[in-house]
Image: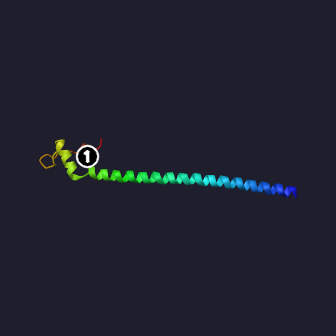
Amino acid sequence: MLRLNFLLLLAVMLSALYLVQTQYESRRLFTALHQATNEARNLETEYQRLQVELRAQSAPSRIESMAAAQGMQSASPAITHYVHDVQQEGGAQ
C-alpha cells in the first residue's frame, strides 16, 4: 500500500510539473505572437507610408519641375541621337 501511495504521489508531482511547464511555454508563445503581431502592424504602417511617399515622388508635375531645374528638355527629332551597334554592322568579332 505504501508503495502504491508513493507511485501515485510521484505521478501527481510529475503531472503538476508538466502542467507548469506547459503553461509557461503557452505564455511564452502568446507573448511571441503578440510581439509578432505588433511588428506586422508596424511594418504595414511603414509600407503604407512608403507607398504614399512613392506616389508623391513620382507625380508628373514634380518630375517635370525637377527636369526643368536640371536643364533637361523634351525629346524631339532634332535632338535625338541614334546609337548603332558596332558588332551587328561590322560582323562578329
Left or right: residue 79 compared with residue 18: left
Report x, y in % for residue 66. Answer: 20, 45
Badge 1: residue crowd in 10 Å (few <14, some 14–19, many ≥20): few
Quadrant housing the C terminus: top left
Q: Residue furthest right?
A: 1
Q: Which residue is mark 1?
A: 88
Judged from the image, the secondary structure of the residue bearing numbered disc 1 is helix
Would residue 81 be seen by someone viewing this image from the given angle? no
Tell me what residue is drawn at x 80 percent, y 57 percent. 8
Left or right: residue 15 compared with residue 35: right
Tell me what residue is drawn at x 42 percent, y 51 percent. 42
Q: How many marks?
A: 1
Report x, y in % for residue 54. Answer: 30, 51
Quadrant housing the N terminus: bottom right
Tell me what residue is drawn at x 67 percent, y 53 percent. 20
Would residue 64 be seen by someone viewing this image from the given angle? yes
Report x, y in % for residue 47. Answer: 38, 52
Q: Residue type at mark 1: give it.
A: Gln
Q: Nearer the viewer, residue 72 or 14?
A: 14
Q: Residue furthest left?
A: 78
Left or right: residue 40 compared with residue 71: right
Report x, y in % for residue 45. Answer: 39, 53
Tell me what residue is drawn at x 50 percent, y 51 percent. 35
Q: Quadrant of residue 5?
A: bottom right
